Image (cartoon, rainbow, N blue to C red):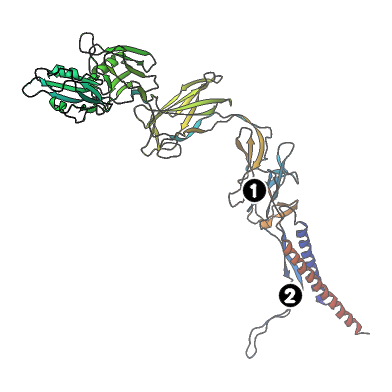
Amino acid sequence: MVSTALYTGLSGLRVHQAYIDVIGNNLANVSTPGFRGSRVTFSDILSFTVRSGSGPNGNFGGQNPLQIGTGAIMATVDTDLSQGTLADTGRTLDVALQGRGFFTLTNGNQTFYSRVGSFGIDANRTLVDLRTGLRVVNSTGGDIDVPVSDTLPAAPTSAVRFQGNLPARVGGPLEEIVQSNVALKQGTAATKTATASGASFPLFDLTGFAGRTVLVSVNGAAQQSLQIPAGTTTLNAQGVAAIFSASGISTTFDNAAGTVAISSVKLGSSATLKLDDGPSANGLLAALGMNATLVSGTETTAATTTDLAQLTARVNPYIAGDSITISGTNPDGTAFSDTFVYGNGVGQDGTTIASLLTFINATVDPAQATASLTTDGNIRLTATDKEEADLSLFIGDVTNNSGRISWPNFVVSQDGTGPDTAVTSIDVIDAQGRTHPVTMTFTRSTTDPTIWDLSAEIDPTDGTLTQASIGQIRFNDNGSFNVIGGGTNSLTFSWNGISAAQSVQVDLGSSGQFDGVAQLGNATTVAAVDQDGYAAGTLLNVGFNDAGQLIGFYSNGQSQTLDTLRISMFSNEAGLVRAGDTLFTESPNSDDAIATTANSAGAGSVRAGQLENSNVDIAREFVNLIEAQRGFQANSRVITTTDEILSELMNIVR
């Protein structure tokens, strides 16, 4: 009888040989992209039952079954479904799957599935698998055509988006203002009064002072020596006034009252007057009823009622008939000029600041500017319109005047400006792909500083603007954009050579938000930052994104989805049949393919420019190889031992 151990050992040799075959295939494909390794599992063969088991019976205990195994068989060769590592290739048409799923390929008759996305373009501009020539299937089940010489038509601009800031601080519109650089003041002189007294009244008894002097200092200047005429005994008020004939002094007298007023010609707080007895003239001031105390004038801000002769800027007081030249330019640059005559007589224009202002207002163009006196005493000429202006004013004395005033210069205290504006520009694309520069100007309302208007301007040789402005762009108190209140938010262009008008929407942001145009602070940063039109372009390159979409990149900077890869899913991926070239086909146990796209229905994402490496673990395969080798050796030893036993059995009959 031949021992069953021979067949048992033989089965062991067979399964371990198959085990080595599987390991060898795994190691052979360790560098094959997309390869999925295999795993072997063994099962024992039906055992030979020598004795069936029995349960306990009476005084006898139960016995286990007595069985002898008859060897092993290879039960399964499973596919390892674990993810392989991804390697960069630098090719835009190489793709890998991160996660579940298979790329779908076809030869027109049969569908194949692969984890290897080494794709390229054939002569028919069809996307194919470079290893096999199989066509790549798109999401709808058709071929993927790559339009390598495709032209992307132009798209006209339909919207322009703005961002940035319009200044909250109002810088215009402003009227131009010209005013005196020094305020006008009215004042009084420093005055001393001489009063006759005693028995000689109303004469001044100056007996004993003949030939003597009195010293006078005016406005802090050096003292002047004034002499009493020789032989003088008594003088009336007029005679005393004649003695005080000195530079910078004016006198008035009243013979009947016996009084003499000695005053500085200069007016104001800087006007001073001081008298002193000259040498050997002790008692002269007392005889005149005066003292040596320093006196000063006073001054206040000039008013419209102030007489011109009472201005502290006078050098000598005006008298009737003195003339003042008034000249300058109106805001529009036209000149004006006339002469003001001081006095209240016939042919004279008045004596007060009010009369001077009336004269100036009659001299300038009354529709363009107005003269006035400010509360701080400045003569001001204000333009009527709020815009840039050439306003100027000059006031000066005629040369032969008796009186003279040191008139101030007139300077521009506020430049005339138009409304606040902010200018930006952007290119608008027409339906033929032509580019047209458009200048956009924001202009602040002259009545409400929180409202702006937008106007557009193009080169007249390009066409015309049939809707060139957008009105009443409003902002909230916090500076955020509110609403366009002017009835339209679009500009309309009529381009030469194109019959249909082109409407372009203006996007200023969301109401109540700061995602577009705002009105904050002083900075002006508003700009047209984007428009959605583009010129025609040719295809430059193609590549895949994570969703498996084939994207075309064009010379005009645009991109477009050309097609989408089909990703096939299976209920049981391990049930697929290997068809060579790292391809799989369906089997009854894999179930039918579920057609989907990347990132959908459990499918993984597509990684462009990469290929999936083999998932074979070399270290694990070497361990398995040692295990298979030792298993093979052990089973061969069983056969050898059984052969030796049978040989001994044959020798018994000798």
Amino acid type, callout 2: Ser
| Left or right: residue 460 compared with residue 358 | right
Q: Which residue is situated farthest in the right direction here? A: 654
Element under label 1? strand
**Crowd tier of the residue under label 2, counting other residues whose Cα lies within 10 Å: few below 14, some 14–19, many 20 or above:** few
Residue found at the far left of this picture: 199
Q: Is residue 207 left or right of residue 168?
A: left
Instruction: Tell me where residue 397 appears, x and y as whole percent.
Output: 31, 15
Q: Nearer the viewer, residue 4 or 404?
A: 404
Snapshot quadrant of residue 330 = top left
Neighbours of disc 1 within 10 Å: few (<14), some (14-19), many (20+): many
Q: Farthest bottom residue? A: 59
Task: Give me the residue at 68% from left, 57% from top.
Answer: 575
Q: Earlier in the sequence, mark 2 or mark 1?
A: 2
Q: Which residue is disc 1 drawn over? A: 607
- The number of callouts visible is 2
Query: Where the N terminus falls, by quadrant?
Result: bottom right
Q: Which x, y percent locates residue 352?
A: 23, 18
Q: Name the foreground residue: 648 vs 472.
A: 472
Inter-mark Cα distance, 2 to 1: 52 Å
Name the mark on residue 47: 2
Question: Which amino acid type corresponds to the residue marked 1 in the rendered image?
Answer: Arg
| Numbered badge on residue 290 | none
Secondary structure at badge 2 equals loop
Height in image: 245 above or below 625? above
